[in-house]
Amino acid sequence: MSDAECVRFLQWALPQLRMRWDGFRKVRGQVRKRLARRLGELGLADTEAYREYLQTHAEEWQYLDTVCRITISRFYRDKGVYAALSKEVMPTLARAAEQRREKLVRVWSAGCGGGEEPYTIAILWHLELRDRYPDLEIEIVATDTDPAMLARARKGRYAFASIKDLPARWRDRAFQQQDSAYRLMPAFRRDITFLERDIRNEQAAGPFDLVLCRNLVFTYFDDALQSELLSRIVVTMRGGAALVLGIHEQLPAAAQGLGSWFDKLRIYREPLCP
């Protein structure tokens, strides 16, 4: 399958999945490989034949939806985000929890993939912040729609390429090398619950102090679906909570219509971080 053929197909198919082509420009290679594999499984000559197949096999759209899931991730992705979380965002949320006389800071990692993001948050908390807030614990709910990625996350076992961006002192304290892989120590895994959830159909149960929704809703879904999901995400957050976006993401224009709940949120993404 040529790249041009893949692009034409995605530009036709994605709107029918309530997704947008712009989000796939730089990552379409992953989808292209999966599409080529699927055509081979179905014995189809090209994407034109696949279009015809989709039009006569409605159930195949669900399979195509899984083909379009992007699974690229790593620990400490976009270091400016984690710098802001460590220095500003999470200390602010921790102090607010203390003022409410609560014992937990609750975090939702939406679209957690293989667990890299929620585990990075857990490492950050235990190595940078826990001693400053000894009366607080962290609870992280990590959701994803891909059962294979969740199974990987629960194992907590990674190649060095996945963890190489972590600060060396974090890496040395949090991981134990086993042959050619690195296994996350139990102390950094116990605060996380992994759940299979499609954010389009079901959100995690709040209230949350911090929601990380990076490189998912506001990258791959169309504007109308972004607005729908943002309104549902906001409902899971307490007033004064923080919502973290991906480095290149923007909220939909309709976000201004969310009212008082939205007015209480702090929005963070890397260009705003030191």
Image: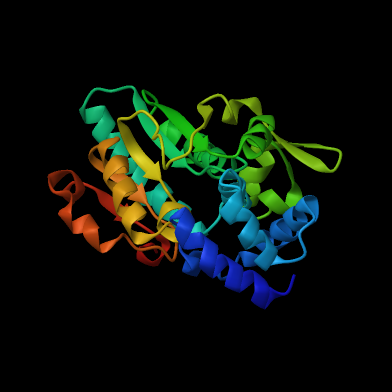
Instruction: Name the quadrant containing residue 72.
Output: bottom right
Q: Which of 243 and 19 is in front in this view?
A: 19
The part of the image, by quadrant, that contains residue 119 is top right
Q: Is residue 70 visible?
A: no
Image location of residue 106, percent across then percent down: 37, 31
Q: Which residue lies furthest to the front in this view?
A: 56
Q: Where is 120 relative to 52, above or below?
A: above
Residue reaching furthest to the bottom: 4
Total of numbered circles in the picture?
0
Image quarter of the C terminus: bottom left
Residue positioned 61% across, 61% down in the render = 51
**Residue in view at x 24 percent, y 22 percent:** 101
Q: Position of residue 84 (x, y in %)?
A: 40, 54
Camera-side residue of 16 and 7: 16
Q: Farthest residue to the left: give it.
A: 260
In the image, is residue 217 above or below residue 1? Answer: above
In screen coordinates, is 142 left or right of 67?
Answer: left
Q: Relative to 20, is 234 on the left or the right?
A: left
In the picture provided, is 150 more to the left or to the right than 128? Answer: right
What residue sits 37% from the left and 26% below the top?
A: 136
Whether residue 200 is visible to the viewer of this picture, yes or no, is yes
Q: In which quarter of the image is the N terminus?
A: bottom right
Q: In this view, does 15 lie to the left or right of 146?
A: left
User: In this rendering, is residue 215 above or below 182?
Assistant: below
Query: How is the protein colored in the picture?
Result: rainbow
Q: Position of residue 128 (x, y in %)?
A: 48, 41
**Horizontal and vertical percent for residue 229?**
34, 46
